[in-house]
Amino acid sequence: MTGVEMGIDGDGRPVVVDLEELLATRLLVQGNSGSGKSHLLRRLLEESAELVQQVVIDPEGDFASLADAFSHLVIDAADYSVSEIDGLGRRVRSHRASVVLNLENLEMEGQMRCAAAFLGALFDAPREHWFPALVVVDEAQLFAPAAGGDVPDDVRRASLGAMTNLMCRGRKRGLAGVVATQRLAKLAKNVAAEASNFLMGRTFLDIDMQRAADLLGMERRQAEAIRDLGRGEFLALGPALSRRPLNVRIGEVRTGARSAAPKLVPLPPPSAEGAAGMADLLLAPGLEQPAAAPPPPAPVPVDQLLRRIEAPPTAPAPAPAATLAAVPELPPPALEEREEAMRQAIAEIVADGEAPPPAAAFQDFVLRCRMRGVPATLDMAGFARRLALARAGVDDEEEWGEAIALAAALPEEMLAPFLALARAARECLPCPSDEALAALYRTTSPGRARRMLAFVEEKGLIVCRVDLAGKRSVSLPHLGWTTAPAAPGPARPTVSGRVAAREPRPFPVG
């Protein structure tokens, strides 16, 4: 068991959380403001920082200080667009970086949009990136409200859907949801119900006490004990915590939040003039204007942030010896250098094996070019064309001019699979399978790939033939090229623009 010590129980014995069990069963934390929820989450994050990847959705900016003691990267969401947040989420998943998504400078609608995009990117990661990760969402009632609020319905549905995916379906993808809320009554029931571990702090409203008691399996008369909990005390229950409700006092933490509990400060001594002197002081004309607040720091460019995610620094970088003004201006890159950089950027996108939307792929291409110090001179249409050529394995555009000209009659998304068929036919390679064509068609459905083949065949650009062994070959009559026969996959292939309803019967013998 990989244990994380959270504090002590009423008898002074340590209370340990089974981290591996927590990753499989999720955690719900509840408590009124001031009950110690953030302190509890900070304790859990600090004790497990070296054991598992951590992603913190932080609406108040309280957990940014984790970066001072650990390798967490703080992402100020207000500095980036939704598409850039989506790209950052995909990179965080693939490079297993621990991050804090700081949402404090956004309004509620912006916070919900950003959290939905980021959690959606974590959830939609390809299977090879399903590494275990602890996803902590503070003030979860903001992102999974039990009822509609002042935000548009589409924003609320997107945020609630992302939270539901995290808690309901995230386990198989390695995502362990840890949600904290002030009131259970304000949190969507389908999100709260998926947690198997509970840490219930102080609350006073009857409806919240009853829901907490129901989740803990306590009788209604025992629910009064929840009112008597002190700050930093929680009732723990769950397979990763305890089989019976257990009182836990959370231990100390090493980092602190910027927002602390208010402390009483003595008032200044009264002036000798009394109230009249104070009035003259406050209402005197010509008061000096307070000094203007310093401007906020410039946002970190998204390309620099991507580089930090891909290679997290092990120690703070030393201060630069020279100022920015002293850096000499570099000459513009040559045409050949620019073309080679763009070719390498497109090759890296193809090698990633992902199929993001065209706009996100183009944004990724622009960022990769900027990271190489060259401008991206291709527009959206030109990039989509070059990306389709690269995914089909076609290098020289002039050499494949005839095939590309034929593809002009097809929709843009069919260019890559058509060129893959043309390449296989020209080089007498086996016909690509339904799965390979589906990947080039940016789908996971072999049925869509077969329907795409039928559409191209109806256009007269290809002719599909299936022999008696069920192997498909594709000819390009305008170019005189034909692929070698190959099995299209377990499903029945397309024949003359239709999908066969059953397998061919063998010829009778005798």
Image (tube, grey):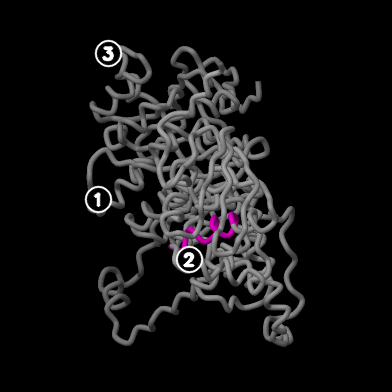
Q: Residue at x 58, y 35 (%)?
A: 252
SS under mark 3: helix
- Disc 3 marks a residue whose amino acid type is Arg
Residue 342 vs 420, above or below: the answer is below
Q: Which residue is mark 1?
A: 153
Rendering coords of residue 287 (x, y %): 35, 83
Farthest-out residue, right: 321
Horizontal side of residue 41 vs 369, given as left or right: left
Comes first in the chain, label 3 or label 1? 1
Q: Which residue is mark 3?
A: 221
Q: Which SS type dominates the magenta stretch?
A: helix
- Quarter of the image for residue 113 reads bottom left
Q: Which residues are magenta?
A: 411-421
SS under mark 1: helix
Q: Which residue is mark 2?
A: 79
Comes first in the chain, label 3 or label 2? 2
Q: How many residues crowd around disc 1 within 10 Å: few (fewer than 14), some, or many (20 or more)?
A: few
- Closer-to-camera residue (184/11): 184
